[in-house]
Amino acid sequence: MKYMLTYDLMESARNTNQWLGATARAWGAYPIMAATGNPMVEWVKAWGEVTERTFARMVVKPDWGISAVTGDDGRDHTVRIETVVSKPFGNLIHFRVPGRFPRERRVLLVAPMSGHYATLLRKTVISLLPDCEVYITDWTNARDIPVSDGKFDVEDYTLYVAEFMRHLGPDIHVMAVCQPAPLVLAATALLAEEAPEAQPRTLILVGGPIDPDAAPTEVTDFGRRTTMGVLEQTVIQQVGFKYRGVGRMVYPGLLQLASFMSMNAQTHSQSFLDQILRTAKGEAGDHDKHNAFYDEYLAVMDMTAEFYLSTVERIFKGREIARNEFTVDGRRVDIGRISTVAVMVVEGEKDDISAPGQCLAALDLLTGLPSAKKAAHLEPKAGHYGIFAGKSWRDNIRPLVLKFIDGNSGKHGRRGRGLSLMPAVAASTGE
């Protein structure tokens, strides 16, 4: 399947479905159709509206949609998104709030590169903005990156994160969500060896596959039973002429989306049928619960072939992070070198992507870190999404994360104030 033709055929199929939806919607909107009195007209129109929106969202990068935040003075302050570091495969951006005093807490969110844009963490950003200066890694869709910009694999990702942390300085607090957790851990270890003064104050790892074998899931089982040759031949395609990255080998976002949806096909099918019914009845809204979720969920981005394949081969199959054998530019990165960065692990009891135990494995790798600087939280009944953007995050996890940050900031952190968090975290896990 590593051909430009297959990439363009898939894009053509998406385009055709979008056109069919738009056609059905326009057909049902003709006044003369209303005169027929046939209820099927509204059904066809509703199907067209939902179908057009669904297939259109697949190739659009969502907007952050964060216009203002309430300040200490009770007034709404505008939020400006500014690029701090610009690189071919991703930028470091800052949500700057003019007119308010800069917050002492400076947080870098490392967004996953696993099919969705960084906007997947929009709710996380919104929840942190009132109390923190928030930065985030905004990865670029691989289809839009010219081949002349070179490769991008797990080692390059690690170097990008290390550069971003170095740029922000040692008073930064880093939070890695899902996929980047093992690579952010490696980036921190890299700084511990090469530039100790640039290490962050704290590192919060949220639902990431540090050791995929610690608690197997459907995701890890797939990576284990599928050979690299099969993956390369079946999911890697070449970007077509429509995009700037023409000729680049990628794992297309549309294929990733098909994989995501197949895991819960019945749930998604029922959700779309219900939305068509609500639309036909005039009960659906542009920003209703269905559209708010699927506008983000359906917006997918291509990954470079080398990043996807090296992730499967080195993180999941080879377990290089779990075995502390990860290398960058031929040099081993020793996670045991981390000795001053306070590390907190957050997991969800019902997480079916990175099951409990996978992320917790990070604490065993931190052999040079005192136990007083280690913390763990298992959120009861929480799934994968809930631990960084849902109710569990807002009500329980966010307060613990902020407390952990405060307990390990500046002089307080050096005096070991982080000790006070441990009993609270242990109690929340039932230990």
Image (spheres, grey):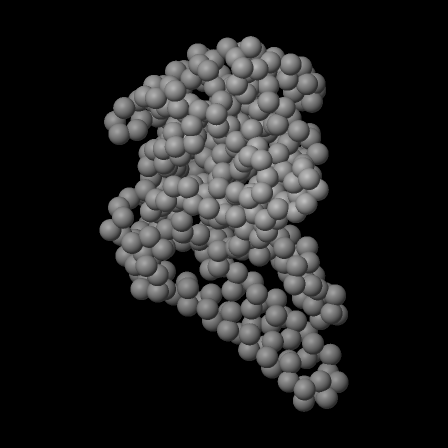
Front residue of 25 and 227: 25
Q: In this view, does 276 lie above or below 348?
A: below
In which quadrant of the rendered view does residue 417 lie?
top right
Q: Position of residue 162 (x, y in %)?
A: 38, 30
User: Which sits in the foreground, 381 or 78?
Assistant: 78
The answer to whether residue 187 is seen in the rendering is yes
Please tell me which residue is depicted at 71% across the width and 85% down the height of the picture. Answer: 34
Q: Which residue is drawn at 49% across and 22% down?
A: 201
Q: Is residue 130 shown above or below 369?
A: below
**Residue occupying the point 40% across, 49% down:** 140
Is 178 or 225 nearer to us in this picture?
178
Numbered disc total: 0
Residue 290 in picture, x, y percent from top left: 66, 56
Tell me the quarter of the image containing the C terminus.
top right
Is any part of residue 231 visible from this angle? no
In this picture, residue 147 sits left or right of residue 381: left
Does 80 sit above or below residue 336? below
Nearest the viewer among 106 and 257 is 106
**Residue 281 location, x and y as percent?**
75, 70
Q: Name the image quarter holding the N terminus.
A: bottom left
Q: From the viewer's perspective, is residue 84 above or below residue 320?
A: below
From the viewer's perspective, tell me whether residue 368 is left or right of residue 408. Answer: left
Q: Position of residue 35 (x, y in %)?
A: 72, 88
**Is 264 positioned to the left or the right of 222 in the image?**
right
Identify the residue shown where x is 39% and y is 37%: 312
